[in-house]
Image (cartoon, rainbow, N blue to C red):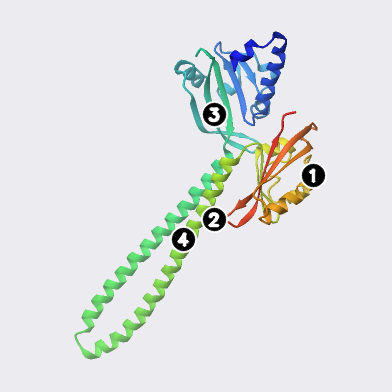
Amino acid sequence: MVDELEMEPLEDADGYRRIRELAADAVPEAMVVVHTSGMVAMINSTAHQLLGLSARDIGRPFQDLKISCHPTELRSAVEQVQKEELPLVLQQVPFRVGPVECLDIHVVPIVDAAGGLLGVALTFIDVSLARRLQDQLEHSNRDLETAYVELQATNEELETTHEELQSTIEALETTNEQLQSTAKELETMNAELHATNEELQYINDVLRLRTGELDEVNDFLESLLVSQRGGFVVMDRDLRISVWNDGSAELWGVRTDEAPGQHFLNLDIGLPVEDLRGPIAAVLAGDSQEETVDLDATNRRGREIRCRVSLTPLLGRDRETRGVIVLVEELAT
């Protein structure tokens, strides 16, 4: 691609540079490019908002920027990638700005067609949702482990009781009268043991139910991780929003902590949601597995855009439609 751009007429250079700048700004993740000289070569618009950078920082030494050492030491990471020319990923780095809680930072070498190193690209990816879901999953697992330990303790107590019962039976066999009396006691104990076994069966049923719920959480997490690009919204059959990603917040100005629980068609945003009522109904009714609509909209900055809205059903493990997944992509104009 670099060779092809160099062969185009010189008067198109500004146009190609503008396309590259717009493409970088269209990336939903924050990106900073550092030249091999150590100077900042590029900062996209998402990095301006998330990292507190501005166009004035382009051309400055990277080591002079606060982001070079906060939220973690990045200067050594940049030096390592420049030296080894191999990608480096810093996972789940704590970083609290607005709804963002942690980041994955990808440090990648940039080379030309001849293999020469031009610089290093740093991409800051918000993984807060995945981290929260992982924490919830770990918490559920701990609850299950606690229940299992309690179940084991109950089984051990039952085994001890059974051993004591056997010992009592052997002692009561010395006389016929004691045996008759003990038989009645044993019937009572057996009834209690039966009731205890029923309680244990109930606990096992609850554990199986918890396992099913964890499977649904895993399916839901995998669906989000695979599908999350652009504006991403998940709603239930009543059109109440359950997931509203950062891309949606960036497009329409409704924060990720404001949207959940709201009725999708009642949102006051620049997207003409009323035009989606029919396609949503078709997806919920099972008449369509995917609906795609191109709409004119106004983003949160007041800019007129053309976007493509894709709607697919949110399926449960029983393959029943539980809601609708909405993906909004801004089309190039």
Is residue 218 left or right of 57 when viewed as pictured?
left
Mark 3 or mark 1, earlier in chain: 3
Q: Give the Cα separation between the discs numbered 3 and 1.
A: 34 Å
Q: Amino acid at mark 4?
A: Arg
Please name the amino acid that badge 1 sits on. Asp
Task: Where is residue 214? Give x, y as percent.
Answer: 50, 53
* Earlier sequence position, callout 1 versus callout 4: 4
**Mark 2 = which residue?**
317
Query: What is the distance, in whole Å, between disc 1 and disc 4 at their CAs?
Result: 42 Å
Residue 321: x %, y % from top left: 62, 55
Q: Is residue 316 above or below residue 66?
A: below
Judged by depth in the image, the label closer to the viewer, 2 or 3, is 2
Which mark's residue is nearer the viewer, 3 or 4? 4
The answer to which of marks 4 and 2 sits earlier in the sequence is: 4
Q: Quadrant of residue 287?
A: bottom right
Mark 1 and mark 4 in contact? Answer it, CB < 8 Å. no
Give the labeled residue for mark 3. 105
Q: Quadrant of residue 130?
A: top right
Q: CA distance from mark 2 to mark 3?
A: 34 Å
- The residue lying furthest to the top in this view is 10
Residue annotated with mark 1: 268
Q: Which residue is mark 4?
A: 208
Q: Is residue 129 above or below residue 46?
A: below
